[in-house]
Image (cartoon, grey):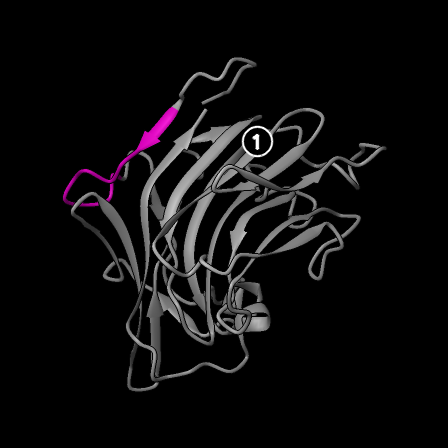
Amino acid sequence: MSCGKSSKLIFEENFDGKTLNENYWNYDLGDGCPNLCGWGNNERQLYTKENVKIIDGNLIITATKKGSLYQSGKIHTKKKVEFQYGTVEVRAKLPVGYGLWPAIWMLGNDIDTNTWPACGEIDIMEHVGKEPNTIHTSLHTPASYGNTINTKKTIHTEIEKGYHIYKTVWSKESITFYIDSQKVYTFSPDEKNEETWPFNKPFYLILNLAIGGNFGGPEVDDTIFPQEFIVDYVKIY
């Protein structure tokens, strides 16, 4: 799918079915091994299909702990829904607890041949339980990745209560992030080249709930489980 200059709705997912629509979504399964153990971040969860449910018009990704095993879910639209420029809007309710790391994010569709961070990453929303009431919006590029300088922390004292809308508007010139219609960060480097702006190609969307890891952990409060990351809808214009 491609997105032109007009704000035409090109993808809408309200999770109205009984199961995940695999015409649009793929599952990531396992722990990332052997190629990307811990999914590159020393995360502790095993991703399963069972931890992803569609219930009453919501996507519910549940983080669980059984014995010493942490499980959760991750889905993405690679090779199914990809677009260049546009607006992504996601209405979601966050899980709460030390060690959790829910995220709404995007990767360049050339990642298999143009590996991260060269492919580019757009983090529409990241929340880590060890930093309550805080949303991270970030960009990863060859010029700045991992602990990237292209990032903004937004304090929002009600963010862990109820649903909130996370939106990103991506154009040729800039990428702007919103929480509940409030603009929180704009990224627009003066010089746009392969090092600073790998955002001139199609990207795909990812929804997941990680546990622990370099950003979410390393400590995890085992008393919090189960916890749910609930997504009401996804719209792409």
Q: Which residue is mark 1?
A: 169
Q: Secondary structure at mark 1?
A: strand
Nearer the observer, 156 or 23: 156
Image-based side of 3 in relation to 154, left or right: left
User: Seen from this angle, which residue lies furthest right?
Assistant: 191
Q: Height in image: 64 above or below 85?
A: below
Q: Does residue 72 show up magenta in the picture?
A: no
Q: Is residue 129 visible?
A: yes
Dominant SS of magenta comes to loop
Q: Residue at x 72, y 55 (%)?
A: 145
Residue type for callout 1: Val
Q: Is residue 21 above or below residue 158?
A: above
198 versus 145 height, above or below: above
Tell which of 17 and 93 is nearer to you: 93
Residue at 49%, 20% in the rendered image: 2
Residue 207: give x, y in percent of width and height: 42, 50
Residue 16 lies in magenta, yes or no? yes
Using residue 50 as the reference point, say whether residue 108 is left or right of it: right
181 left or right of 233 in image: right
Q: Which residues are magenta?
A: 11-21
Q: Is residue 154 above or below residue 23?
A: below
Q: Residue at x 37, y 64 (%)?
A: 95
- Across and down, in percent, residue 70 comes to 36, 76
Task: Please say whether residue 42 is visible from this viewpoint.
Answer: no
